[in-house]
Amino acid sequence: MANTLGIVKPDAVRRKLVGRIVERIERAGLILRGMKVMKLTREQAEKFYAVHEGKPFFKSLVEYMTSGPIVVMVIGGHGSIERWRELMGVTDPAKAKYNTIRREFGTSIEKNVVHGSDCLETARREVGFFFREDEVLPKEI
């Protein structure tokens, strides 16, 4: 039972969608094991999205992710990585399946309201980027 990272991005926080997104996570049977509201610095955003450095969208992604507060979450439960990604929908809201978070709330590929880890290795790295071990509830709770 692995944990995964979820981020509610600045546009969704500004639009007061955090509660609706968390409700969808819980309704899907996933478990919040940690949650923080924060504002990324440019350095943090560049480090977190370093895999995209050199790509045409890197600079605008960093600007966007530092434009306002975000909510970072540790999401647990059986199959949490796959289930969270399914609940989010694909990156482009216009191409996402109906009843997904990005389809319902996203406004563009960049402003797609949420982020999720794509695999176990990434999830471990991303959760560790935002959370110390003692900030994540154990799986037994």
Image (spheres, helix red, strand yellow):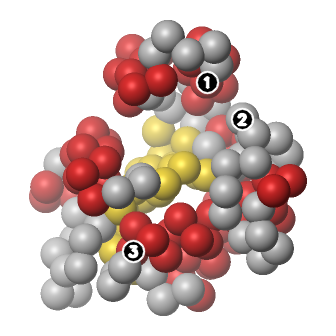
Q: Earlier in the sequence, mark 1 or mark 3?
A: 1
Q: What secondary structure is marked by label 3? A: helix
Give the residue number, with chain letter if any, for mark 1. Answer: 61
| Above or below 69: residue 133 | below
Pointer 1 local density, CA inside 10 Å: few below 14, some 14–19, many at least 20 = some
Give the x, y percent position of residue 91: 67, 49
Q: What secondary structure is marked by label 2? A: loop
| Above or below 114: residue 32 | below
Residue type at numbered disc 3: Ser
Q: Nearer the viewer, residue 45 or 20?
A: 45
Tell me whether the residue at label 1 lies in contact with that at label 3, contact meaning CB atoms closer than 8 angstroms: no
Give the x, y percent position of residue 77: 34, 82
Q: Earlier in the sequence, mark 2 or mark 3?
A: 3
| Numbered badge on residue 80 | 3
Instruction: Measure the alpha-carbon separation of dots 2 and 1.
Output: 7 Å
Give the x, y percent position of residue 25: 55, 76
Q: Is residue 79 left or right of residue 109?
A: left
| Above or below 100: residue 103 | above
Q: What secondary structure is marked by label 1? A: helix
Q: Nearer the viewer, residue 76 or 83?
A: 83
Query: What residue is rendered at 76% in x and 61% in y?
Result: 96
- Quadrant including the C terminus: bottom left
- Quadrant including the N terminus: bottom left
Query: What residue is rendered at 39% in x and 15% in y?
Result: 43
Give the residue number, with chain letter if any, for mark 2. Answer: 110
Q: Nearer the viewer, residue 48 or 56?
A: 56
Query: What residue is rendered at 85% in x and 46% in y?
Result: 107
Instruction: Measure the alpha-carbon separation of dots 1 and 3.
Output: 25 Å
Give the x, y percent position of residue 61: 61, 24
Tell me whether the residue at label 2 lies in contact with that at label 1, contact meaning CB atoms closer than 8 angstroms: yes
Residue type at numbered disc 2: Glu
Pointer 3 local density, CA inside 10 Å: few below 14, some 14–19, many at least 20 = many
